[in-house]
Image (cartoon, grey):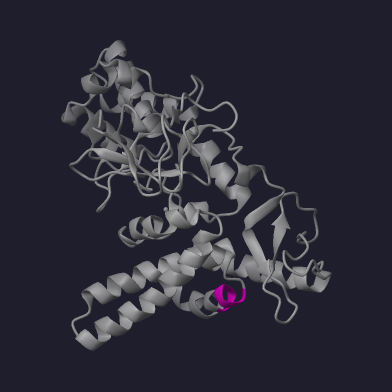
Amino acid sequence: REPGGGEGLFATHPWKPGQTLLRDRPLARLQAEAFDKEDPALLAKAHACLAEDGQLEVLLGSDAGMALWRGEPEDPRRDAFRRCVEDTWPEGTAEARARRAEAMCIFSFNSYMTQDGGRFHAVFPIISKANHRCDPNCWVVVPESEPGELVSARPVSEGEEVTVSYLCKADLLRPLLKRRALLRDGWEFNCCCSRCASELDDMRRFCCPLPGCPGTSAALREQLAGGLEASSCSSCGAVPAEAARQAWAERELQVEALVEGLPESLYCAWAPCEDFARDHPLHGLAGRWKNFIARRTQAEAHEADDEDERAALEEEGEVHRLALQRCLAEVLHEEFVEEALHEELAKPLSPPLPQPHEDADPG
């Protein structure tokens, strides 16, 4: 978080891309679904798992656990957790119920979901102290039964802060204001990283309409009512005409509704989303569409009985994967992209909705 982040982690010596900075055994693990403060049923399940798994004392009985961020005293989720514990464990003492609610806060703010299906939330004594950036220099690897790893995504200098993304890769492809809203809702801070502080929204890039020009125009951070405001072309310097900007805005609105509606909207989404991804391959919506299609095609290839069909699906999936890679490479450093794709495409197929800490899981 910049400025005003948590304690944070800092490199004690230089690291090359792909190196493991540290391995960190989980302080506590919880087999439960997301801690959704708006869903009492999910909260009740999480509380039941917390009571059964015996993680409470491990988390609250250690200095490492108590040092982790637990949110502001007036945070709505704290009240939701307290109500959940009171409703599902009325026989507990007030002190015991307060401790369980406190443990739920720690998991909510600090846990990472394990890979290969995301069955567990894992809280780490060191990794969980890393601050967020929308262009992180490290990623978190969370196996189901092994220690978590902090791996460098690009060169990290001695003394440089080690940062990770709290958002999954699909959410890193969302527009600036949407990313910041997700972070405010999930972790109670306004992201001020270089991407979020920019005057341009790097996830709303439109290809220059001039024939042969390889440049793009990005939507301005501050938009005026009545139309899309965009920068001049990054290559030729031309200012996009009002008619072009209006056409961009109309298509963007249409495709956004279709992508948000996946998978239900798949069949009506295919043609307009493919056309949009062809015309504006560096736009975040193109990346999110390709992310969904690459994962879906990969799943279909895995289930195919016929070898020729499997080969055709794998070839098609690779085309979508490369398109996603191109989009990711615009906002994440090149060294990060292959690991990001491996991690993102390994997840179970589901709609690209916000899933905090899904990167290490981590979309």
Q: Quarter-wise, where is residue 78 in the image? A: top left
On the image, which quarter does residue 349 sit in? bottom left
Image side of residue 320 versus residue 345, left or right: right
Picture layout, residue 71 above or below residue 21: above
* Residue 77: in magenta span: no
Image location (x, y in percent) of residue 222: 75, 49
Q: Is residue 265 visible?
A: no
Q: Who is closer to the viewer here, 310 or 236?
A: 236
Residues shaded magenta:
275-279
What is the quadrant of residue 145 in the picture?
A: top left
Relative to 66, say whether 209 is above or below: below
Q: Where, quadrant-wise, is the N terminus in this rendering?
A: top right
Residue 236 image point, x, y percent: 77, 70
Q: Nearer the viewer, residue 153 or 2?
A: 153
Left or right, 342 with respect to 228, comes to left
Residue at 49%, 52% in the rendered image: 171
Is residue 172 visible in this depiction of the protein? yes
Q: Residue at x 24, y 35 (%)?
A: 30
Main SS of the magenta segment? helix
Q: Residue furthest bottom?
A: 308
Can you give x and y, in whole percent of width and height, for residue 256 in the image?
A: 57, 64
